[in-house]
Amino acid sequence: MNQALDALCINTIRMLSVDAVQKANSGHPGAPMGLAPAAYTLWTRFLKHNPRNPEWWDRDRFVLSAGHGSMLLYSMLFLTGYDLPLEQIKQFRQWGSRTPGHPERELTPGVETTTGPLGQGFGNGVGMAMAEAHLAARYNRPGFEIVNHFTYAIVSDGDLMEGVAAEAASLAGHLKLGKLIYLYDNNRISLAGATDLSFTEDCAKRFEAYGWHTLSVENGNDLEAIHGAIRAAREEQSRPSLILLRTHIGFGSPGKQDTFEAHGSPLGEAEVKRTKENLGWPLEPAFYIPKEAQTHFHAAISTGQKAEANWQEHFNAYREKFSDLAREFQQIMSGALPANWQASIPSFPADPKGLATRAASGKIIAALGTALPTLIGGSADLNPSTFTVLPKLGDFESPQRKFIDNQGSAGGDWNYAGRNIHFGVREHAMGATINGMAAHGGLIPFGSTFLIFSDYMRPSMRLAALMELGVIYVFTHDSIGPGGRADPPTGGAIGGASRHPASDRHSTRRRQRDFSRLADRDRKSLMSSGIGLEPPERTDSGA
Amino acid sequence: MNQALDALCINTIRMLSVDAVQKANSGHPGAPMGLAPAAYTLWTRFLKHNPRNPEWWDRDRFVLSAGHGSMLLYSMLFLTGYDLPLEQIKQFRQWGSRTPGHPERELTPGVETTTGPLGQGFGNGVGMAMAEAHLAARYNRPGFEIVNHFTYAIVSDGDLMEGVAAEAASLAGHLKLGKLIYLYDNNRISLAGATDLSFTEDCAKRFEAYGWHTLSVENGNDLEAIHGAIRAAREEQSRPSLILLRTHIGFGSPGKQDTFEAHGSPLGEAEVKRTKENLGWPLEPAFYIPKEAQTHFHAAISTGQKAEANWQEHFNAYREKFSDLAREFQQIMSGALPANWQASIPSFPADPKGLATRAASGKIIAALGTALPTLIGGSADLNPSTFTVLPKLGDFESPQRKFIDNQGSAGGDWNYAGRNIHFGVREHAMGATINGMAAHGGLIPFGSTFLIFSDYMRPSMRLAALMELGVIYVFTHDSIGPGGRADPPTGGAIGGASRHPASDRHSTRRRQRDFSRLADRDRKSLMSSGIGLEPPERTDSGA
């Protein structure tokens, strides 16, 4: 009986997605068809959420990184009772609807982050788990786990191929984010054909190398295997988990299952009919929702309301006992800034000697770190150059980590409460994870690198802009010509490049060519200004 | 005796680098000091090159991906007799010199590619090895291996952290590029501190997961271990090789070895002195080159001339036997285009129905594929959408690969002679590898994706521009507003987005907002033009 109900619910997801894509005459039906059992299992048996309050902030976060499979997410949101009525499903990909081709944060209730450009959702989820770990370390107290949620994502082969996901996975493994659980939709088909045309690596081994816990589900239709894997992933809290799920794109379609034709196009009327026949589904009406299925899915509403009420009760007790902490917690979750935070900002009186902008920036960041409990961030391995340290606020690292410094002695105590993040030489993951932290809520994250390396994280910056996320970028070393240097060196703090800029900005060859075209007079004035073609380099250590 | 000479030569590299950085009062001395033994072993015992003709095209390619360690490369070029006199070493990082802070292709003889932005050189090397594999498959004949060289690179922790390198490594493993050999400078120090602040993955395991052969050298000063590892890497021709080399940044500096202070700053006069004392090096003069060392290094000149002469003789015999092939080979290596290649380009008479630009582009690419033996490329998993296929010219895949299609039967014959490259969903690696192919010579590579995803490969595009490399980009789907769609759908071929653009270009939310601000008249005209805010989506399969 339960098995029959499970099957009915799963086919409801499949057919809703198929019908919506067919009606729109565009979209990606294959992924929702293959993933329906996994999504069903996760959403009905594990996901902590309240469809009636998508903003309840101790909810689990769910990210569909493979955003092109959007109808899967819309099906789950509609079926479990979010404010996304069937009419919106029927308006999939239509002008003015809340169901665009790819999920968009703030347009659709329950969509945590805008996804579509592959790899970004993967990185966002890592950021969400970082935010959860940080806030838990800051605000939880023994017996009071007011911050305690998982971050789940469904990721695709395309996500795993993107460099931004590789960077974020390495960072997540390093940080031992145990409450991060990803399901990899291993359907072996990409837009252009079989994935093994270009992607034959051993994904499980790669993620183990990053420090992840990996699990394998051989049959993506086996609910108990999926259930067992998710449970095991939840129990392993010392590492992030990747569940490799062997699925079949377009599952149930006699003519298109396991082909790239199920990837990015509607099945077509005839194939929709064959698929419904194959799965024992009524041919009419389209968008058919069996009553038993709807009832079963709607259990999420009362379950969610109860979960939030329980949490609220727990939080009330916490507030009784830790009133200052609770006040600060409520304030940061609301996004409000503390009173008088501006008072902390230092002013810089006119000074004939001048102050490098990055030096002034560093002083302001340091002051704001104290004034704003929500400020958190770091650089892509350039702290000594970008001056983006929050003094005395600790490093964001796993408490499990035993840091051994180069002299062989154990370093300081590490934990997730630290507010200086070491992103490593991973600009793109920095961009994607600070997006995830901002989307999670409760934090104002910042990321820093040299201006030119913003190119490495540009796709994430674009999404931050589209989502209007409150992230901050600190880009230094923005003059037009570092690399070579003027002779004699003039020293000083303006500009200055260090890590790899010689080839950056402008090649020496071209700069020399351009420079030789300048009139002598102009050349001299640029050279002496110290801010022209050849700014001096930093000579202090670390740059 | 030989060991003493080896040590003398290695310290020559170290001290030349130290003195040059010190004189410039800027630069990165630590990497050359740690890597000198590996560079010495590679360059004097293995590297096939002719310092007197850096353009000899069957030379091994060498890439210093960690471009900030440029003095290592300049030292090797100067010492082995390239046209880079000592005076240029003394002018390190000075205006007008050929020794800028980071190596630049075409500025300095022997520099194969511009490096500095981390990860790019890693990807370039993969492209060079792809070019070698392809040209070997096309032009070699039994007994005549006129194309037969290795691609070596020195890569750093920063390179391995970058997503572009992860993508390129996965692609190289998939393609089984056996003549690609990378040495990983595992010194455990990055610019901002110890790498284990952010980078604790198991690199060997990760590369094995990609399909690489990995070797470990525990002591980066152990010449015989380095020698053995390189030899084993050369013998393993069915997979790319990564040699993990435990080095010590700033080796020999009593005060700065193994610290980030040796990374990006001169040692300082006092520490230079202590280092020379420590290594038994004369304090004066700076830039001291022992005669025995110079003589030993200069053996590369005669060895190189002999190697090229042998190759030339071999090629002459090949030309006797395969005159047509030899003619074509000489032509493509010269970079000249075949006579009348333009005649193949189809023309498109005025047509009231119109033709999508990507469709016209596809026809031209197909025609040029036949006319130009050098044209090679593909897309980042978007062939069915970007129309960038070279018909009947085969897929660029390893001959070792047995492709099993979805029906379980073995696919076609695969080999490196194919000219359609499946880059996978790896835009950045696509950008970096086509740079490498162009830098290698003999090919005109192209890469394709949707315009907005050019953001993912932007750092590689910038380097292509700085190097003025002959790469071609085909970017389709460039209209301003795909994602949602106009209702009713209008069909047709212009624009149209498929993989993940809903969230792309412009969010639906913002587009709807912007759209609602338009006057009715403008709105109507945009809707009906089919090229305005809401272009129709492709409805054919594969998009």
Image (tube, coloured by chain):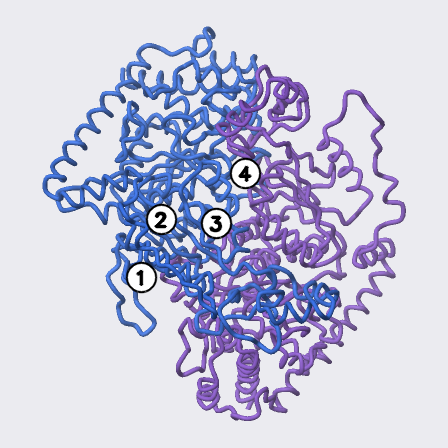
Chain colours: A blue, B purple
Q: Give coordinates of residue B396: x percent, y percent.
A: 66, 46
At label 1, the amino acid type is Pro
Q: Would residue B445 be visible to someone looking at this image? A: yes
Mark 1 and mark 2 in contact (Cβ < 8 Å)? no
Q: Judge left or right: residue B113 versus residue A55.
A: right
Mark 4 and mark 1 in contact (Cβ < 8 Å)? no
Displayed quadrant of residue B202? bottom left
The mark lying in front, picked from 2 and 1, is 1
Mark 3 → mark 2, Cα distance in angstroms: 20 Å
Residue A195 has which mark?
A: 4
Which residue is the site of mark 2?
A212
At label 2, the amino acid type is Trp
The mark lying in front, picked from 3 and 4, is 3
Q: Is mark 2 on a helix, strand or loop?
A: loop
Q: Quadrant of the C terminus of chain B?
A: top right
Mark 3 → mark 1, Cα distance in angstroms: 25 Å
Which sits in the foreground, A436 or A214? A436
Which residue is the site of mark 3?
A428
At label 4, the amino acid type is Thr
Q: Earlier in the sequence, mark 2 or mark 1?
A: 2
Q: Judge left or right: residue A476 versus residue B392.
A: left
Mark 3 → mark 4, Cα distance in angstroms: 24 Å
Chain of the residue under label 2: A
Q: Which of marks 1 and 4 is nearer the N terminus?
A: 4
Displayed quadrant of residue B233? bottom right
Which residue is the site of mark 1?
A391
Mark 4 → mark 2, Cα distance in angstroms: 23 Å
Q: Do labels 3 and 2 share a chain?
A: yes
At label 3, the amino acid type is His
